[in-house]
Image (cartoon, grey):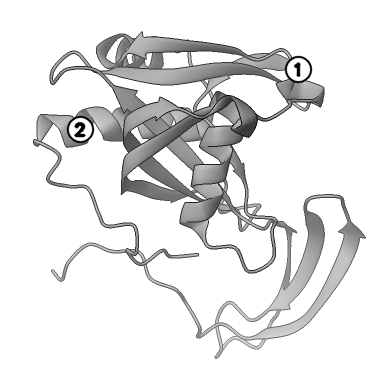
Amino acid sequence: MSELSDVKDTGRQVLASRRVHRGRVMDLVADEVLLAPDDGAPVVREYLDHPGAVAVVALRGEPGREEVLLLNQYRHPARVVLWEIPAGLLDVDGEDPLPAARRELGEEADLRAATWDVLVDFFTSPGGSDESVRVYLARDVSDVEDHERHERTDEERDMELVWVPLDEAVAAVHAGRIHNPATVVGILATASARAQDWAPLRGVDAAWLR
């Protein structure tokens, strides 16, 4: 068996595509696609067309006693307040993901980081959305200058920020007390990478399947 890896598929022909609804952040799209070229029977697949996002596991502390930054935020579709890692949309035209991640860490947590690595990439719901998220690991963190602090509004206005021991965060994931997907994936990937002395980390220019 060759190396286990997801791949981009270009063999299935999209016969038609239309935007069913155009939203503020994402659109609902309907594609007419041939799943089997020799079948001749197209199917319609509706999905959310999403710009993608970045998320950041900010880590501090001595080896073996690291802490991860979490913030809580109200998420209206689910009607819950979730503990999350800093994250944001890739909604600035032409912006690379790393500067977007730096911006989100600064805006949501008033932090900067000197060391950045790619931790993990994932599709949030590939059966119904094309949203892809890149999660970075940010280390050697420090506070931004006072004049760089971002004024938070809407759901971000009342966010609580806490530093949680990484082992405690992992236990919270396994106990079903943390539900945000980027946070679950990021915490577990961080713990896995730490257990391997950070060998699995990738450079910030690593390829991203999206």
In this figure, which residue is indicated by the disc labeled 1? 79
Q: What x and y, as percent, mark residue 108? A: 60, 28
Relative depth, front residue between 63 and 46:
63
Total marks shown come to 2
Residue drawn where x is 62% and y is 86% of the image: 13
| Residue shown at 87% from the left, 52% from the top | 23
Image coordinates for residue 181, horizontal then vertical, percent: 50, 32
Name the amino acid, label 1: Arg
Q: Which mark is residue 192?
A: 2
Say above or below: 154 vs 21: above
Left or right position of 178 against 103: left
Quarter-of-image position of residue 31: bottom right
Q: Is residue 32 above or below residue 58?
A: below
Q: Extreme right residue here? A: 21
Left or right: 100 with respect to 174? right
The residue that appears at 39% across and 32% down in the rendered structure is 57
Taking depth in this image into account, of 58 and 185 the one nearest to the observer is 58
Judge whether 125 appears above or below 208 on screen.
Answer: above
User: Going 66% across and 19% down the picture, which residue do you hit?
Assistant: 73
Residue 138 position within the rendered picture, expressed as x and y whole percent measured from the top left? 35, 37
Label 1: which secondary element: loop
Tag 2: Cα neighbours inside 10 Å, few (<14), some, or many (≥20)? Answer: some
Left or right: 150, with 204 as reference point? right
Q: Is residue 124 visible?
A: no
Residue furthest left in the image = 197
From mark 1 to mark 2, how far is it between C-alphas? 31 Å
The amino acid type found where label 2 is placed reads: Ser
**N-terminal of the two: label 1 or label 2?**
1
Secondary structure category for the residue under label 2: helix
The picture quadrant where one finds residue 4 is bottom left
Quarter location, residue 147: top right
